[in-house]
Amino acid sequence: MFFRILKQSFFQGKKQKFLAILTILLSSSLITALLNTSIDIGDKMTAELKAYGANINVIPKSETLSLEIGGVDYNPLKGQIYLKEKDLFKVKDIFWRNNIVGFSPFLKKDVMFDNNSNQKVTIVGTYFDKNSPIPDEKDYRTGVIRLNSYWNVEGKWPKDDSNNALVGINLAQKLGIKIGDTIKLKHNNTKAQFKVSGILNSGEDKDDQIIASLGPVQKLLNLEGKLNLITVSALSVPEDDLSRKSRRNPDALDSLEYDSWYCTAYVSSIAYQIEENVPNAAVKPIWQVAAGEGAIIKKIQLLMMVVTIAALFASAMGISSLMSTTIMKRSKEIGLIKALGASSNEVYLLFLSEAIIIGIVGGLLGYVLGCFLSQLISYSIFSSFVSIKLVVLPVILSISVFISLLGSIIPSRMITKLLPIEVLYGRK
Amino acid sequence: MSDKKNVLKIKNLVKSFGDVKALDNINLEINEGEWVAIMGPSGSGKTTLINILSLMDDISEGEFTLAGDDASSLSEEEKVVFRREKIGLIFQQFHLIPYLSAVENVMLAQYYHSVTDEEEAKKVLTKVGLGHRLEHLPSQLSGGEQQRVCIARALINEPEVLLADEPTGNLDEENEKIVLSIFKDLHKEGKTIILITHNPELGKHADKVLMLKHGKVDKG
């Protein structure tokens, strides 16, 4: 009988019900959109921030040995131990391989101009956009064109394994080098020529260097198959307490924390796995990038939470006002039910059940609208769609029912105060 | 002395609203199966008295015993239970739930009393001559039919006392006769009926008449 009463009574006061559902719909759609975006924002922001360069550096272990006396570096192995080019694929052969966006190998050394000036210059060998087969992807391509999209090249990017090169803008200005010029270089007894295909403006130390394809540079330096830096761009989750703890001291993690840390795509755990996998490598996350990402994402999520709470309260107030009107309108009915022997709790149950239905209907419709809204938001900000999270649905339904009940609590207290005699006879 | 069970007893009852005494020194005893009419002009205190008898209002002074219990000492929750267990209410304005059918309105009283039994609800509606209007909404029924639904709702839980407030006040002559005949039948069945009315025709059939005037029993 209760459901029969509920069913019939739910379709009373259609205007109020419609407005109540609309109120819940608007707030739940906003919350859905914010939640959907908020869940994805970490990945989206990380992907955005990847455009600003790599967040992990892989260097030979010997570089990390410190033997400095009076400001003079006495590390006997410095600059002598190299990473191997044939181990490059191992960077992307870890548990978090799908999070590795790309990597660029570098071999950097000072050489001399092969002219009478005897001037020193730094040459850097790298991949521009080279096929670098990895176990699951034989046609995988990577290099600085993909990773360092902020590098601005006037002219053309050199082809890999060609003798074309980029000249840093500062160096070009200093020496009057132009596109199309040929640069002659020598190292020990080896000589090489590079044709300038473009001028590089990177805003980094590369603006004072010559950037060429890795193979010819290795040949010039007589270091075939060798590297002294790999920069890696990895999609990572923002830093939190656990990752900061591991950063301070990985040994301080207990086994549960360790498993959780290892299986989360923190920049530190990705770095750790690369170090495990690449021989003779010391892997250093670029903390400024990682911490910056975390801070930005945290602030955006906080902002979203504030908006969500504001939406929640605004709609609860709306529901409260609508519910008050409904109860006033149906006071005779409430008085009669009480006169027939219903307790205040039984009347509450009827109105709160209606509130739950309003919450569920409004929440469901709000979820659908919110998913659409989140796509609009994501596309307009990140130029890509967010994935629809089903896990958001139960959360939204719970929030919608909570808003609806919250808005109904104060008006429902009027039910207790309604006496049958007042509403049936209009007086006390 | 009658050997019938005493259903209701009020002694020296006073009901005041501020300084105004709406009811002053009312005494009344009603036994099982009696039909009592409370009559009097407008403003004489009839409705105030029936509100007290239906436990919807409190007394200011005096004693009020209903079905052997001191009704004046009951808490609000106990009054709710008492009302649904022992009293059947019939209103002048019918007070039916507009979105429930005739049978659902009757079942509503069953629901708040104990459990619903649709067949039983239909049977009572048939008894008051509405077997053909079971699924109609109040808006689809005439005033007389709505009042009969109200009577069926009051009867469904077999209360100890039927309290009717001007049950024919809003009805035409034809429907008044139908309702009167229902009350007669109920009286024959041994129901205890307390009825407020202006209508001398209804008062004529009562075993006992309490005439009120300005809140007091008019003995003239």
Image (tube, rainbow, N blue to C red):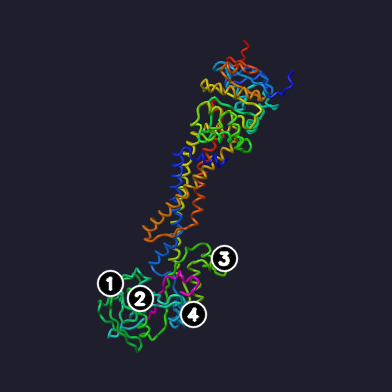
Magenta-drawn segment: A92-109
Asked if the magenta segment contains residue A99, the reply would be yes
Q: Callout 3: helix, strand or loop?
A: helix
Asked if the magenta segment contains residue B86, the reply would be no
Please tell me whether mark 2 or mark 1 is closer to you in this view.
2
Rounded to the nearest whole Å, what is the CA distance between mark 2 and mark 1?
Answer: 15 Å
Q: In the image, are marks 4 and 1 on the same chain?
A: yes
Which tag, 4 or 1, sits closer to the chain's start?
Answer: 1
Say which residue label 4 marks.
Answer: A280
Rounded to the nearest whole Å, what is the CA distance between mark 3 and mark 2?
Answer: 39 Å
Q: Which quarter of the rendered picture does the C terminus of chain B lie within?
A: top right
**Whole-percent x and y of residue A388?**
45, 58
Question: In the figure, B36 relative to A284: above or below?
Answer: above
Residue A412 seen: yes
**Whole-percent x and y of residue A327?**
50, 35
What mark, if any, has residue A257 been given in the picture? 3
The three-letter code of the residue at mark 2 reads Phe
What mark, if any, has residue A128 been given in the picture? 2
